[in-house]
Image (cartoon, rainbow, N blue to C red):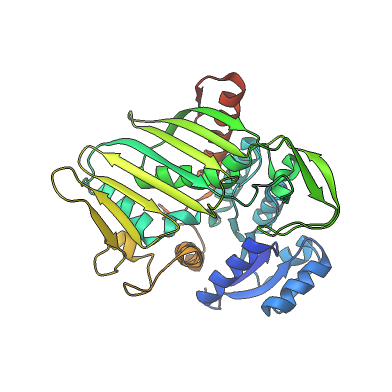
Amino acid sequence: MDRPIRAAVVGTGFIGAVHIDALRRLGIEIAGVLGSSPERGRLCSTDLGIPHAYASLAELLADDRVDVVHITSPNSEHAAQAHAVIAAGKHIVCEKPLATSSEDARSLLAAAEAAGLVHCVNFNQRFYPQAQEMASRVRDGSVGAIRLLSGSYLQDWLLADTDWNWRLDAAIGGPLRAVGDIGSHWLDLASFVSDLRVESVLAELITVHPIRHAPVGPVATFASASGDTVPHQISTEDIALLLVRYAGGARGSLTLSQVSPGRKNRLWLEVDGSQDALAWCNETPDELWIGHRGRASELSQRDPSLLSPLAQQSTWHPGGHAEGFPDSFRALYHAVYADVATGHPSPGPTYPTFADGLTQALIGDAVLASATSGTWAPVNAS
C-alpha cells in the first residue's frame, strides 16, 4: 500500500477506546468513529481527539480513506455490520462473539474468504507474550503429550442484582453470556496453546439472579448503575461449569463466573503434559509457571531475551517492564495489519480469524445443547 493505512471504529464504549489506543500505538491513523447515536459519536470524537464522527455505517463504508473497520458494537449488531463491511471491500476486525448464532458466523466466514479480505476476531488473550510462550513450549515437545487443560475465568462486575449492562439482555448479548463473553476467550486460548480441538462438552449453566433491576438509562461496561430501576428477567448464565473432551484424548475443566467477589478479570489456564506443566494468569501476565516432577518447578518472568521466537513477536518492553491488557491488543493488531499491508490474508494467519469465531459459536451451540439435556453434546464440525 502506497499510503498510510487508515482504520475506522464502530462502537464508542470501553472496548472501542481500547481498540483506538492500540491502533494509535502502532501508528495506524483513525479516520473516524461511529457511535450508537450521532451524539455519542461526536462525544467520543471530541474526548479521544478523532477527526470525524460518522452519522451512519453507510457514511463510514463510503469513506474511501478507510481500509479496515473495527466492530466493537453490541453483539447482536455484529453480523449485519460485518456483512456490510465485507460487501464494501474493507478488511475487518470484529469483537467476539463474531455473531450470536453459528449460522451467522458461518455466513460471515464464507463471505470474508470469498472476498479475499483480512478478517480477525478479537481474541486478544492469545497475544500476551507468556501465552505465546506456552504455545511455543507445547509445540516444541517439552511439555509432552497434553493430558489435562484446566482453569477459570472469574469476574465480579455483575455480582449484585442491581448491576446492569446490555450483555444481560439476551436479545442484545446473545443466548450465552458468561460462556460467550469470557468463556470464549478461555476456550480459544486453551485450543491455541494446546493445538487441540474441542470435540464435546458437558455444561451446567447457573443464573444467580433470575431477576435483575435495570436502570432506566444506559450503563457503560464495568460502571455502577444508580437512580431509578425496573425489574428485568434474566435468561443467561452468571456461572458456567464445563467439562471438555479434546481431540486426541485430552480432557478439560473450566469454571466461569461474573459473580465472584474480588475477582476483577482473572483468567487462569493450566496445561498438564506427560513431561511438564504450564500455568498462566492474565492478572500477573509477565509470570509463567513451569511445573516439573523430578526437579524444582520454575516461575519464569517475561524477558524478551529468554522467550521463544514466537513469543518475542508479541513483546516490546525489556524484562521488568510489565506488559498487560492494552499491550495484547497492540500485539494482535501488529499481526493483523502486517497482512492488511499486503492487501490479503497470509496462508496461515498467526491471529484468530473468522474461522476461530465460528469455532466458538459451534462450541456455544454444544454448551446450550448440553445444558438443556444434561448430557455430553458434540461440537459439530465447521
Give the image location of residue 328, x and y in percent.
Answer: 46, 63
Q: Quadrant of residue 170?
A: top right
Q: Could you say which is closer to the camera, residue 340 or residue 226? A: 226
In the depicted structure, whether residue 364 falls above or below residue 301: above
In the depicted structure, whether residue 264 falls above or below residue 187: below
The reply to whether residue 63 is visible in this rendering is: no
Residue pictured at 70% horizontal, 72% vertical:
32
Report how many numbered discs are placed on residues in the image: 0
Residue pictured at 39% horizontal, 39% vertical:
150
Residue pictured at 50% horizontal, 59% vertical:
344
Give the image location of residue 138, x and y in percent.
Answer: 28, 47
Q: Does 36 sit left or right of 318 as displayed?
A: right
Give the image location of residue 356, x and y in percent.
Answer: 50, 45
Give the image location of residue 365, x and y in percent.
Answer: 59, 31
The reply to whether residue 99 is visible in this rendering is: yes
Q: Does 128 sit left or right of 209 as displayed?
A: left
Q: Could you say which is closer to the camera, residue 373 or residue 364? A: 373
Q: Quadrant of residue 364?
A: top right
In the depicted structure, whether residue 102 falls above or below residue 131: above
Residue pictured at 72% horizontal, 63% vertical:
61
